[in-house]
Amino acid sequence: MNLLNEVNKDVWDQIKSKADQMLASIGDKSPHVAGTNGIYDDMRIDWWTSGFWPGMLWIVYDMTGDEKYKEAAWNWDERLSERFLENNYYDHDVGFHFLPTAVIKYKLTGDADAARRALFAANFLAGRFNTKGSFIRAWNGDMLGWSIIDTMMNLSLLFWASEESGDPRFSHIAKAHADMVMKQFVREDGSVHHIIRFDPETGDRAEAIGGQGAAPDSAWSRGAAWALYGLTNTYRYTEDPAYLDTAQRVANFFISSLPEDSVPHWDFRAESEEGEKIPRDSSAGAIAASGLLELAEVLPEPEGRIYATVAKRILSSLRDHYGTWNLPEHEGILLEGTGHKPAGQNVNVSLIYGDYFYVEASAKLNGWKHRIF
Ligand code: GLY
């Protein structure tokens, strides 16, 4: 489906002026969360979110051709890859680190060093595959058999590595993981688990864990957004209709669970706590909108149009009710993100990945054709 006729230049101009403000104030920081003071923190560089700010800069560079964004984004992949040789916390999220830095840099500039760094990261990710149970290990420490839905978004690094190197092993691993996700994570109704723990010796499923969702059988909205987007990407790389069917099942669940203003609650099955409103997660809305635009593009009319319409409805609501357009000092773009509600962390804040996916989705609607994920 062609989205090109959906140009909305006003939104893009608004984003560009916000990106300029962010560039002036964020500088070399590795932003993750901005609370009520509107100032982004500066996380360690191997934290899972550090690729999103440079990724946003690469997109704005690609859309505008303005070298200042390229200059600001340029050395991020080098900074990130140097950390591999030091004590580090890298895990399955190296896709979130190296796709919006090294891979996009290579695609836009042909920089061979960037491609080598991305291939190194892809090898690291492939090395986390547990053959018993067919899952890519998520986290480190003693969480040996833990697999999480978020990994679906990191598979694009493996698919890219196979295309780039000609070595099919990366994509075999990505497909094996995605097949496992369809069996173990996606429920009949299209909702998804956050965490499944396996016995890493036998590959047997041990239990489902609530994780960042409200409960093991709840429906964490950002997890659903990662799933619908990651499964659509997997379909794009493989053309296997099973991934497309499952992506649509998750998307249909997500859409049918949206509240009136189309911006998801943090968990679709969260119960309200004594008189409190259930917090939203604007980041889940932005991620899902970008994934729904991908789904729209791979489907024929009129099916595709339905997903594009919902994506645009989510983006309009984010712009009208959750944006910081009237808060020039606020470094984030979207308000009301929820990071980890069960841990009481980062509720009702700006999240750099919410901002990134809002920019990414808006760029797609304005004709951006390169893909990061
Ligand atoms: N990937 C971690 C999260 O979505 O919070």
Image: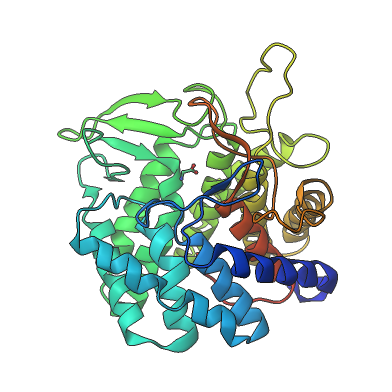
Quarter where residue 268 is shown = top right
Between residues 336 and 313, which one lies in front from this camera angle?
A: 336
Res. 240 visible in picture: no
Q: Nearer the viewer, residue 162 or 334?
A: 334
Q: In this rendered view, identify the residue nearer to me: 131 or 363.
A: 363
Left or right, 95 with respect to 253, comes to: left
Q: Nearer the viewer, residue 264 or 294?
A: 264
Residue drawn at 78 percent across, 67 percent down? 14
Q: Residue furthest left?
A: 201
Give residue 83's position: percent from left, percent from top.
Answer: 26, 62
Identity of the residue drawn at 76% across and 58% down: 328
Residue shown at 49% from the left, 37% from the top: 186
Question: In the displayed structure, does residue 72 sit left or right of residue 158?
Answer: right
Residue 354, compared with residue 72, is above or below; it is above
Residue 185, percent from left and from top: 44, 36
Q: Position of residue 24 (x, y in %)?
A: 61, 69
Horizontally, residue 65 falls left or right of residue 243, namely right
Q: Position of residue 244 (x, y in %)?
A: 55, 54
